[in-house]
Amino acid sequence: MYMEFCGFSLRNHLFVAPMAGVTDRPFRQLCKRLGAGLAVSEMVTSNSLLYGSAKTRRRADHAGEAEPVAVQIAGADPAMLAQAARYNVDNGAQIIDVNMGCPAKKVCNVMAGSALMQDEALVARILDAVVEAVPETPVTLKIRTGWNREHKNALAIARIAEDAGIRALAIHGRTRADQYTGEAEYDTIAEVKAAVAIPVIANGDITTPEKAKYVLDLTHADGVMIGRAAQGRPWLFREIEHFLKTGENLPPPQVMDIHAVLQEHLQDLYAFYGVDTGVKIARKHISWYTRGLAGSAAFRKNMNTLPSIASQQQAVDDFFLRLAQHSGHPEYPDVMDTLADVNSLEALAA
Ligand SMILES: Cc1cc2nc3c(=O)[nH]c(=O)nc-3n(C[C@H](O)[C@H](O)[C@H](O)COP(=O)(O)O)c2cc1C
């Protein structure tokens, strides 16, 4: 399962997708511990660097993070992106990932994220500038399949990327116009994989070990990248790894196992963000861990009123103890049914 990636030896070819407001250091660490080969950090916009905001500084904090540290940058100006790449490498980034995959208005209004795919000449200038700014560091790129369904130019962008010295490409199987609607398609990813020599990572709607295998077989991609399905289920990577190795599914986690992972995650969040922000950020994760479980709607509503670490932890402990008394195996709903709840990009504003 080992994978050579950008000069690093990864435990496997399973990647955590960058998600603003989600893939902070505690979440990345947890996913790596529970089976992910690589976790890309939340994007650091080139603009916010200029202001040196607390959020940007926190996003660039990689203390104790398992290697390799991959940081995503976003923006539309080649010089500013080059500067952002340099800043992050000087602060510990070992891989720089350029975001041309995000459809969020906050990013796209300034012609960044996936909106950039419209302007292939600008893509080339950006990638050349970033690669040149950090010659010692591998640069990767994340894109969608195109601007809209009539303009799927992933292949053209992939060739530009390869020429610019980009070392790997992650492709989300939707166009920018699709946002998060409809189902991801993987034929375009397969087409790009067949045409370029750099590693291609397939992304979009991968929710189970079976789906991961299906996408790998169909696209011949070098790895898969998982975002929403890992929210509240960081052990998904271990489950996929096991299935790909053995063809068998691991037994689902017991209630007490989930409780233990969540407790560990909470401790990390409180330590990383401090009490006030930690308690607020934790609510979102607690809600993901418990979605679909018996009694979770009322539990989540109450959770939003609890102001302290002690009250939050107590409520979590009570919820899981009650659940454990009923069943050792929580009955999760199909994760696809719940993706609609969790794919809100509101987190970007957080
Ligand atoms: C809350 C949220 C935040 C995201 N933030 C980013 C981001 O900062 N950069 C990026 O390239 N993609 C971002 N994405 C897109 C994901 O990386 C991924 O491409 C997308 O969710 C599809 O994968 P999935 O179906 O496994 O979730 C975000 C997605 C979500 C749901």
Image (cartoon, rainbow, N blue to C red):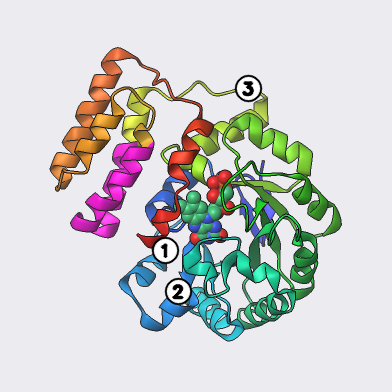
Q: Based on the picture, tell me whether residue 272 belongs to the magenta stretch.
A: yes
Real-space Cα separation, disc 3 to disc 1, in angstroms: 35 Å
Q: Residues within 10 Å of mark 1 (few under 14, many from 20)?
A: many
Residue 34 coordinates in the image, percent (x, y): 48, 40
The label on residue 62 is 1
Residue 153 coordinates in the image, percent (x, y): 76, 62
- Say left or right for 308 vs 261: left
Residue depicted at x 29% and y 57%? 272
Residue depicted at x 56% and y 49%? 180
Residue depicted at x 79% and y 52%? 193
* Relative height, residue 207 to residue 134 (above, below): above
To which residue does mark 3 refer? Answer: 248
- For label 1, the SS is loop
- Amino acid, disc 1: His
- Say left or right for 51 vs 201: left
Q: Based on the picture, tell me whether residue 224 belongs to the magenta stretch.
A: no
- Between 241 and 129, the residue placed more toward the observer is 129
State which region is magenta. Answer: 262-288
Q: Which label's residue is closer to the chain start, 2 or 3?
A: 2
- For label 2, the SS is loop
Residue 266 coordinates in the image, percent (x, y): 29, 45
- For label 3, the SS is loop
- Amino acid, disc 3: Glu
* Marks 1 and 2 close (CB-CB < 8 Å): yes
In which quadrant of the rendered image does the C terminus lie?
bottom left
To which residue does mark 2 refer? Answer: 91
